[in-house]
Image (cartoon, rainbow, N blue to C red):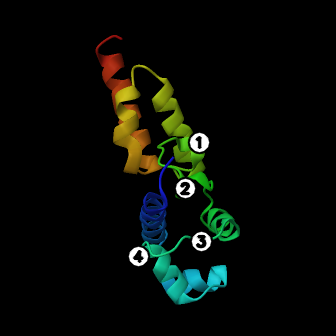
Amino acid sequence: MPNNDDMKKLFSQRLTSIMQEKNINQVELSKVLDVSESTVGKWILCKAMPRMGIIQKLSDYFNVGKSYFLEDSHSPTEGYYTDPEVAEMANKLKNNPDMRILFDAAEDMSKDDIEFVVDMIDKLKKREGK
């Protein structure tokens, strides 16, 4: 079980990452959550953790599971991939032994990029007669 400082650090990293990905700043997020800008700043600086009700609001707003903010796992079904289509594709890569190596590489790829790579591999296999 992670200690409180580890939880704050993980939460801060995940919040910062998803804010950058979704192009939202602290002021905008504070308005969405109905909290002060300084409160959001404290979360980002690992000075405080939000209550579970706020974490639920964050999860709903960013369309990820609460575990995205609270658990150090890389499971696409737990909100690691914020786009449901990309999460589904990642699950296929993860569960296909021939493409398993791509699962970790696909971590930060867009849906189009993943489709391109999978298509390229399929074409190479056909060319090689596999």
Q: Quadrant of residue 21?
A: bottom left
Q: How many marks?
A: 4
Give the number of the disc on residue 77: 1
| Image position of 7 with respect to 107: above or below | below
Give the amino acid type for the residue marked by disc 1 in the picture: Thr
Q: CA distance from mark 1 to mark 3?
A: 23 Å
Give the amino acid type for the residue marked by disc 4 in the picture: Leu
Residue at the image point whose x is 56% and y is 80% from the top: 29
> 82 or 40: which is nearer to us?
40
Q: CA distance from mark 1 to mark 2?
A: 14 Å
Label 2 close to label 3 by CB (< 8 Å): no
Answer with mark 2 or mark 4, whichever residue precedes in sequence: 4
Answer with mark 2 or mark 3, whichever residue precedes in sequence: 3
Q: CA distance from mark 4 to mark 3?
A: 12 Å
Residue 56 position within the rendered picture, expressed as x and y whole percent measured from the top left: 68, 64
Determine which residue is flagged by label 4. 45
Front label number (4 vs 1): 4
Element at label 4: loop
Give the amino acid type for the residue marked by disc 2 in the picture: Leu
| Image position of 89 with respect to 61: above or below | above
Answer with mark 1 or mark 3, whichever residue precedes in sequence: 3
Front label number (1 vs 2): 2
> 18 or 106: which is nearer to us?
18
Residue 61 position within the rendered picture, expressed as x and y whole percent measured from the top left: 64, 68
Determine which residue is flagged by label 3. 50
| Image position of 126 with respect to 55: above or below | above
Answer with mark 1 or mark 2, whichever residue precedes in sequence: 2
